Amino acid sequence: MRLAFFFDQSRCMGCNACTVACKDWYQVNPGAVRYRTHHTYETDEPGGFYSFVMSCNHCEDPACLKACGNQAITKRPDGIVIIDRNKCTELRSCITACPFGAPGIADDRQEPLGKENWKTAHPAQKCTMCADLLDKGELPVCVRACVAHAIEVGDYDELMRKHPGAVQLNIGDFPYAYNNNQDTSTGPSMLIKPRKKLEVSGNN
């Protein structure tokens, strides 16, 4: 199995329920680190703007995993990419390597209390796809919080069959999703149903 996120861009209302629920659940204080992000992009198409939400894409070939010099990042059999914060020594190589800017380092205000077994006060962190909840048969908090049902989690192939027209996240269709670099070889486990273009009828 390869678990993946699905995002319906036409359904997203930009309400930020998913990002707020994620921060609340994991007690991530305000700051630079965000497990799930929301951005609004302007367009000259009818409608004027569209929303895009994303977290770690739990890539098929994660750049962060290959870049980490401490083997602090692993990939589970179901495809979820996990950072072992006990092993992280803040090399920041994962942050540089990730084309989506998913991993982050908190500051003292955002993460005021370090754990005794951490090698550094502020190790790297990111979305875990709520692996602990999935292991109990429960949905990730972002999926539960989305009132528009724009986010799903499931097997990559099953999501493809369920949502005709969905495409894998790619730099050609979604250049704004790429952050630190333009590495297109990671195979992100994120499927997107692109926003429908609004049709404008002419005056009679």
Image: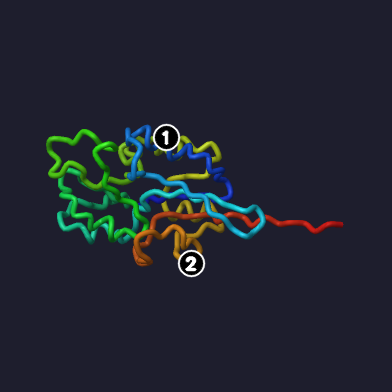
Q: Position of residue 132 (x, y in %)?
A: 30, 37
Amino acid type, label 2 = Gly
Residue 65, image x and y in percent? 24, 57
What is the crowding at mark 2: few (fewer than 14 residues within 10 Å), some, or many (at least 20)? few
Q: Residue 156: x, y in percent?
A: 42, 54
Instruction: Give percent across and percent down for residue 143.
Output: 45, 39
**Which residue occupies the foreground of this view, 117 or 80?**
117
Dividing the image into 4 quarters, which one contains the C terminus? bottom right
Q: Is residue 77 left or right of residue 159?
A: left
Q: Is residue 151 left or right of residue 188?
A: right
Q: Which mark, by number, is residue 21?
A: 1
Residue nearest the viewer, comparing 156 with 117: 117
Q: Number of numbered discs present? A: 2
Kindly report the distance in space between the C-alpha atoms of the residues bearing marks 1 and 2.
30 Å
Q: Of marks 1 and 2, which one's residue comes earlier in the chain? A: 1
Q: Which residue is outermost to the right?
A: 204
Q: Is residue 57 above or below residue 171?
A: above
Picture residue at 29% right of the left edge, 48% below the top: 104
SS for callout 2: loop
Q: Mark 1, residues whose alpha carbon is within 10 Å: few (<14), some, or many (≥20)? A: some
Residue 180 drawn above or below residue 114: below
Q: Which mark is residue 177?
A: none
Badge 1 element: helix
In the foreground, 8 or 201: 201
Residue at (52, 57) in percent of width and height: 166
Residue 85 appears left or right of 160: left
Where residue 118 sits, quadrant-wise, is: top left
Q: Amino acid at mark 1?
A: Ala
Residue at point 28%, 61% (across, down): 97
User: Which residue is denoted by mark 2 in the rendering?
Assistant: 172
Q: Residue at x 62, y 55 (%)?
A: 196
